[in-house]
Amino acid sequence: MPKTVVRIRLGQGASASDVGALKAWLEREHKLEALRSSGDLEIRERAGTEESPGSPMGAGLEIMLVLVGIVGPKLFEEVYEQAKSGVRAWRENRRSVERGEPPEVEVVPDGDAR
């Protein structure tokens, strides 16, 4: 099964505002924005489905980048790399505008999780 989802999991210490801010940041990433505009990508926010160690409430928070339609490996890889780059940039920006360390963020390629 081709990969169609990139999961972005926010770790311990992440707040709902962190999730919203990171989602908004990713929506403005040029390549991701173009795919959203064409209907080929959806960016969703939801409570995590897996328990993560160190998360006091069990499931953490996550953002899902869902590729819609037929997805080739090259397009998936581009979205995955853009997500990782966007997360790095968001963490650097958050570090400069807010006190304390930003939450840890894990970017994971996934199968079809729709």
Image (cartoon, grey):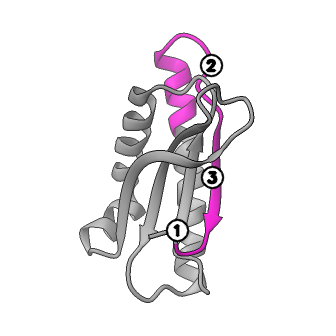
Mark 3 crowd level (few <14, some 14–19, many ≥20, 10 Å Cα): some
Label 2 sits on what residue type?
Glu
Q: Residue furthest top?
A: 99
Q: Is residue 93 above or below residue 76?
A: above
Image quarter of residue 100: top right
In the image, the segment drawn in magenta is 90-112
Q: Nearer the viewer, residue 106 or 78?
A: 106
101 within the magenta span: yes
Label 3 sits on what residue type?
Val
Q: Which mark is residue 107?
A: 3
Q: Which mark is residue 5?
A: 1
Alpha-carbon span between mark 2 and mark 3: 18 Å
Q: Secondary structure at mark 2?
A: loop
Asked whether the residues under the numbered discs 3 and 1 touch, taking CB atoms below 8 Å apart as contact, a structural biologist would say: no
Q: Which residue is mark 2?
A: 101
Residue 114 spot, x, y in % from top left: 44, 70
Image quarter of residue 23: top left
Q: As drawn, is 64 to the left or to the right of 88?
A: left
Q: Nearer the viewer, mark 1 or mark 2?
A: 1
Q: Secondary structure at mark 3?
A: strand
Residue under the image location 55 percent in, 70 percent down: 78
Q: Earlier in the sequence, mark 3 or mark 1?
A: 1
